């Protein structure tokens, strides 16, 4: 069974969300799109929070959220208990988010990178394996 990935964006991340969706499907992942569906201005929490909640509930295995910078989207996602959302700006930051932080959601800023970099980030994060050990114990302490 393939992993199911939640994706969501505001209007400023819409174009990359659509590119990432196609990329994920081409690699055999299931994708659940929580919106938005255009570049018309929207309030990003209306789309980001439901995606994060789907990951927290286990309806989706992982999530990718996007905006102009990715910062606001990460803040909203991280307000959901059980979500560990990392803002990623290159493949290395995404790899480390997976390996060291066990990030189950990543946030990307469409205005901060090229489409090629965004896809490299997604691939690096999806292929990263959490190292566990001391990192896992610390995450469990923080999450209570």
Image (cartoon, rainbow, N blue to C red):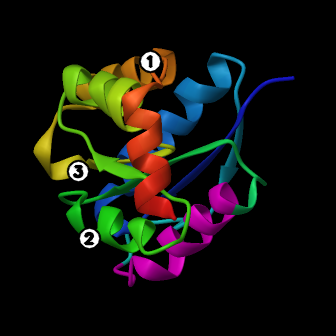
Which mark sits nearer the N-terminus, 2 or 3? 2
Q: Main secondary structure of the magenta part?
A: helix
Which mark sits nearer the N-terminus, 2 or 1? 2
Q: Residue, x 45% and y 25% (percent of image)?
A: 133
Q: Position of residue 114 (x, y in %)?
A: 18, 32
The answer to whether 131 is drawn above or below residue 61 in the figure is above
Q: Position of residue 66 (x, y in %)?
A: 36, 55
Which numbered tag is attached to residue 109? 3
Location of mark 2 (residue): 72
Location of mark 1 (residue): 128
Q: Residue, x 64% and y 55% (percent of image)?
A: 55
Viewer-side label of 3, 1:
1
* SS at mark 1 in the image: loop
Where does the magenta region start and end? 41-56
Which mark sits nearer the N-terminus, 3 or 1? 3
- Report the quarter where the N terminus lies: top right
């Amino acid at each position: 069974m393939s992993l199911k990935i939640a994706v969501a964006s505001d209007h400023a991340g819409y174009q990359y969300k659509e590119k990432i969706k196609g990329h994920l499907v081409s690699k055999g992942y299931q994708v659940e799109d929580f919106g938005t569906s255009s570049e018309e201005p929207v309030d990003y929490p209306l789309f980001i929070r439901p995606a994060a909640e789907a990951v927290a509930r286990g309806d989706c295995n992982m999530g990718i959220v996007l905006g102009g910078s990715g910062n606001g989207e990460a803040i909203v996602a991280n307000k959901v208990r059980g979500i560990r959302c990392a803002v990623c700006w290159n493949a290395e930051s995404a790899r480390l988010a997976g390996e060291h932080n066990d990030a189950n959601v990543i946030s990307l800023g469409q205005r901060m990178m090229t489409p090629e970099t965004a896809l490299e980030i997604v691939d690096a994060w999806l292929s990263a394996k959490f190292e566990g050990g001391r990192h896992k114990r610390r995450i469990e302490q923080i999450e209570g």
